[in-house]
Image (tube, helix red, strand yellow):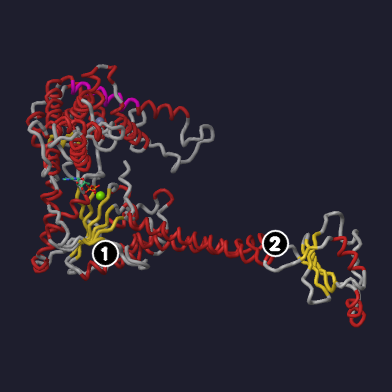
Amino acid sequence: MADKIPKKPVGRPLETNKSNTVRSILFTAILICFGIYVVANMNNTGIQKTEVPISEVIQRANDPEGNIAKITVIGNNLEITLKDKDQPTETSRKDGSGTLYDQGLVNYCDGMEGEELIKCQETYPVIEYKEDVNAWGIVFDIMLTVLPIIAIVIFFSWMMRQANAANNQSMSFGKSRARLYGPDKKKVTFKDVAGNESAKQDLTEIVDFLKNPKKYEKLGAKIPRGVLLAGDPGTGKTLMARAVAGEADVPFFSISGSEFAEMFVGVGASRVRDLFSKAKKNAPSIIFIDEIDAVAHKRDARGGAGREDEQTLNQILVEMDGFDNDSGVIVMAATNRVDMLDKALLRPGRFDRHVNVTLPERKDRLEILKVHFKGKPVEEDVDLEALAKKTAGSSGADLSNIANEAAITAAREGHKAISNKDLTEAFERVAIGPERKSKVLNEKEKKITAYHEAGHAVVGHVLPDSDPVHKVTIIPRGATGGVTWFLPPEDRSYKNIFELKDILARAMGGRVAEKLIFGKDAITTGASSDLKNVAGLAKSMIIEEGMGEETRNLVFPDEATGYYTITTGKPYSEKTAELIDLEIKKLSDEAAKRAEEVLKANKGILDKLAEELLKHETLEEAELEPILKSAKLPTTAKLH
Ligand code: ADP
Ligand code: MG
Ligand code: ZN
């Protein structure tokens, strides 16, 4: 899911300034053009001239007594200079019929030189041809020269504006535009962050370190350097980071990864350098890089990061590696996409602390709503608990949005306080609006999801070689409707065939439970990722691990590693391919059958678990234990 598009920090006054500049440049340009036009026309009209017909000009030109010293032909006009300088200059216009030569104007002196030429010119006029340059031609010429310059000036001033708007400091391209939330700004503390207790607990340690660094240094404790906040958009990561700064009462330098994307080449890295040096000067302090995935996405992902991003990322790494243990600066970063991050960022000494910020559960949603309704006048009938109940899947940002919408609705309706009706209207606008429709489950979907997840949990719990169920939730997350977590009791490199078959069966448990409760017709799309997992695991069991019945101990290299038989183009024969498909199908059929046996034998427990899930949405190990403990393994599902 895409995060909100960060707004550029371009304020209104800057916008006005910008259009002012453009306007004054345009105005100047128009003035210049007008001036040129006037001057050009003055040449034509300013001096008194008599116009004579062309026929007269030709006649006089051919006459040694004609008093013409020179004829200048400019396009369609003739300018006649007289031998008698006291006479006003004459002009004439070509009449358009043929060339002047056709009309009888002869250049008597053509081809002459020296003495002979001078003598000829005393008698006959000199005829000179010039390019046609009329007034508009000049204007046009000048415009051609001037316009690009104007364009360049406009472009540069626009660029300056952009840089200024970005910087709020003219021309300091390399300076960090990190915002400082010092002690003077309104402080955010953990109180402002509702729910997310475990994340807060993790971060309390960071706060303590920032407050009492000596305590840790004395004991030789390695101080955490980088803390990565990971979680869905709107879950309060940015808020959480500010709260850490507020709790510790230290300066907070924040910059967003997406801002780097707008920067000029080479600026990203120098911004990072500047940011870190500012933070070090103000230590103890916090650097917060929001939306770090914007610069630190995997270098090989989708054609690789741009060079600019790579430089920025490298600079971040260099700065973090260069920290002394006692620098007193903690770097926090937030991302919606840990999976997209360059692995280099996650190495020890860099962002090696991870804090998950999760979507709020029901009781946390109530807390968040309380935070955002604090200070807003509400009617007695306002039922925040009911709202918390029906907003499964909403983030903190969504809830704060609902609170704000409710206030707006109440104001628009002219209410003195927010009523429950205002609240419902706001909820419907925010949550059931087209964008979030898929995120908020209706009652029926919720019920299907509850049975689906309960199915995974019961099957996983009952089968002897499956890992214990750790947590079940029906809070949707990303594309999934709910999640059932299984915790492997210890790290193991090998799994045996029984464990793998139990994993297949419990993965099938979701779809099988849906079918059992809602009938064959109620098969939903919610199980597609389970089925993909089953197909993937079953395939690797057969072709990589040699676990097929008929093909036991045989492996089948794939296209990447194997040889090819000439007839099939695969690394094995057509018959073997069929056998492999059959073996894979056998595994998934067996898994579905075992899941069904388990769920049929434990129908009461399945119902009970689904019911509890509908009530609480999330059940932890301790809450699951009493429900699941009486579940039994039917002999039909036994493998050994
Ligand atoms: P993220 O950075 O994870 O995308 P933000 O920190 O920007 O989310 O959250 C956006 C807004 O949502 C916050 O400013 C706050 O008003 C509200 N919000 C989110 N989570 C919480 C929470 N746990 N408690 C209170 N308000 C929250
Ligand atoms: Mg954020
Ligand atoms: Zn499932």
**Residue denoted by label 2:** 134
Helix, strand or loop under label 2: loop
Helix, strand or loop under label 1: helix
Q: Which amino acid does label 1 sit on?
A: Met
Residue range highlighted in magenta: 585-599
Q: Which residue is drawn at 70% across and 69% down?
A: 47
**Residue denoted by label 1:** 320
The foreground one among 213 and 569 is: 213
Q: Quadrant of the C terminus?
A: top left
**481 on left or right of 624:** right
**452 on left or right of 533:** left
Instruction: Determine the main secondary structure of the stretch shown in magenta.
Output: helix
**313 on left or right of 623:** right
> Whole-percent x and y of residue 534?
30, 31
- Whether residue 519 appears in this view of the structure is yes
| Disc with the residue nearer the chain's start (2 vs 1) | 2
Q: What residue type is labelled 2?
A: Asn
